[in-house]
Image (cartoon, rainbow, N blue to C red):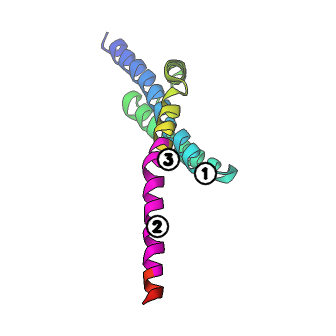
């Protein structure tokens, strides 16, 4: 009975892990949009993310199931990722990107304009003296 309970915990952990990995990938999606990465940048960011995710998933399998790969883990992990995508879809990354661009447009651009005006004034004052 104890073995079944531990496998059920492992199954729940697999679902949660798939969900969490997809949630972390939202950060990658936001970075792609904010920094307008080209093909090489996207490839590098995705490769780095998937290497880190693979190491973390491997650690989970090794610690929780003594390194034994079970098909139900793969299925549960995939279902966790699909569940995240079905529940949240692109809504979170779109919302974060909109917030970042709003902050950039409403706060950062006016500050930059004021700084440029101040620099122009100081340059004019330096030329007069």
First to last magenta residue range: 102-124
Q: Closer to us: mark 2 or mark 3?
A: 2
Q: In this rendering, is residue 24 above or below 1?
A: below
Q: Residue furthest bottom?
A: 129
The picture places residue 95, in percent across and down from the top left corner, at 48, 32
Instruction: Please tell me which residue is depicted at 47% across the width and 80% down the height of the picture.
Output: 124
Task: Give the Cα distance between marks 1 and 3.
Answer: 28 Å
Judge the density around disc 2: few (<14), some (14-19), many (≥20) Cα neighbours within 10 Å: few
* Residue on which the image places disc 2: 117
In depth, the one of 120 and 45 nearer the eye is 120
Give the mark, 2 or 3, whose residue is nearer the N terminus.
3
User: Principal SS element in the magenta part?
Assistant: helix
Q: Indicate whether residue 77 is drawn in magenta.
A: no
Mark number, residue 105: 3
Task: Give the Cα distance between marks 1 and 2.
Answer: 39 Å
Instruction: Please tell me which residue is depicted at 49% across the width and 18% down the height of the picture.
Output: 87
The picture places residue 6, in percent across and down from the top left corner, at 34, 18
Mark number, residue 44: 1
Which element type, helix, strand or loop, lies under badge 1? helix
Q: Residue furthest top?
A: 1
Mark number, residue 100: none
Where on the picture, by quarter, is residue 1? top left
Residue 49, visible in the rendered structure: yes
Q: Is residue 83 left or right of residue 60?
A: right
In depth, the one of 58 and 22 nearer the eye is 22
Please state, as top left, top right, bottom left or bottom right, where the C terminus lies in the image: bottom left
The reply to whether dot 1 and dot 3 touch (C-beta < 8 Å) is no
Instruction: Please tell me which residue is depicted at 48% across the width and 73% down the height of the picture.
Output: 120
Q: Closer to us: mark 1 or mark 2?
A: 2
Judge the density around disc 1: few (<14), some (14-19), many (≥20) Cα neighbours within 10 Å: few
In depth, the one of 100 and 68 nearer the eye is 100
């Amino acid at each position: 009975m104890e073995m079944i309970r531990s496998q059920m915990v492992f199954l729940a952990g697999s679902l949660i892990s798939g969900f969490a990995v997809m949630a972390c990938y939202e950060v990658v999606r936001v970075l792609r949009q904010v920094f307008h990465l080209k093909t090489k940048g996207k490839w590098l960011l995705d490769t780095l993310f998937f290497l880190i995710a693979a190491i973390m998933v491997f650690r989970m399998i090794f610690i929780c199931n003594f390194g034994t790969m079970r098909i139900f883990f793969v299925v549960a992990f995939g279902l966790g990722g699909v569940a995240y995508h079905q529940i949240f879809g692109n809504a979170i990354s779109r919302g974060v990107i909109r917030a970042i661009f709003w902050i950039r447009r409403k706060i950062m651009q006016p500050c930059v304009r004021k700084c440029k005006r101040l620099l122009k004034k100081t340059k004019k004052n330096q030329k007069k003296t």
